[in-house]
Structures are given as C-alpha cells and as structure tokens.
Image: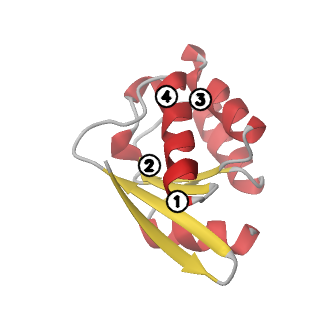
Amino acid sequence: MKIEIVKDKDCVIAVVSDDKKVIVDTQSALDLAMTVKYETGAANIVIDKKLVCDEFFVLSTGIAGEILQKYINYHVRAAFYGDYSHYTSKPLKDFIYESNKGKHFFFLESREEAVNKLIQIQ
C-alpha cells in the first residue's frame, strides 16, 4: 500500500493507492484508517473505489454502514472516488447522495474532487 500526503494549510490528507483491494470488510477498513493515522497523522483519507470490495456497494450487506460508523467513531473522514454511474440501486444512490451532504463520507468522480472536498470541510 502506498500513502501519498497532500497538505493544504492545516489539512493533511492521505491518498491511498495499491494494486489490490485494501477494504474487503469492516476490520480492513478500520486497519487502513489506523495505519494512515499512525503513519501520517492524517484523519482524512482519499481512496479509489477500485480498492474497495464490491460488497461495500450492496447496502444489504451492512458493510458500508459499519465502516461509516467506525470512521465516525474514530474521527476519520473518507472520500472515495470513481465512476458510480453504473449502479442502479436506489438505496445506494440515496446513500451516496446523503453521504455527500454530510461531513464524514463522500463519493466523488475524481481524485482531485475528493481531495478538494476534504479540504473544504476541514
């Protein structure tokens, strides 16, 4: 796993990349957040949705909700970027819409948008 640091004033953002999925369940998402916090001090994470298991985007699995709750509990903000246009699930679309209106969890189209969103809410 590679972690790139982006700094803007007082905002530190960790941009995570890898060749394989790094979030496959709730524990791996928590491990990622704690690793980023320990290694970089960042509480803001940007991650390509390709690095997240497909089950995350099936809300009935509960994985997305569990991860969101863990990140809120540990004061971690996450912005996932990628193409969400092929998802047809209304509950998922609603989840993405509502998350993007909040302050902790975001779903955006590009890495740049994800970084900028975390900078804006800081």
Mark 2 and mark 4 lie on one chain; the one further toward the N terminus is 4
Distance, label 1 to label 4, CA atoms, is 25 Å
Q: Are marks 4 and 3 in contact (CB under 8 Å)?
A: yes
Q: Are marks 2 and 3 in contact (CB under 8 Å)?
A: no
Which comes before the other along the chain, label 4 or label 3? 4
Q: Amino acid at mark 1?
A: Thr
Count neighbours of disc 2 (C-alpha within 10 A) and say few if under 14, some if 14 to 19, many if 20 or more. Answer: few
The tag earlier along the polypeptide, 1 or 2, is 1
Q: Nearer the viewer, mark 2 or mark 3?
A: 3
User: Label 4: which residue?
Assistant: 56
Q: Mark 3 highlights which residue?
A: 64
Residue 62 sits in quarter: top right
**Residue of label 1:** 40
Q: Position of residue 76 (x, y in %)?
A: 67, 48
For marks 1 and 2, give the CA distance. 32 Å
Q: Read off the residue under disc 2.
A: 85
Q: Earlier in the sequence, mark 1 or mark 4?
A: 1
Q: Residue at x 55, y 77 (%)?
A: 7
Amino acid type, label 4: Phe
Q: Secondary structure at mark 2?
A: loop
Kindly report which numbered mark, 1 or 4, lies closer to the viewer in this rendering. 1
Instruction: Identify the residue shown where x is 66% and y is 73%.
Output: 11
Q: Secondary structure at mark 3?
A: helix
User: Label for residue 70?
Assistant: none
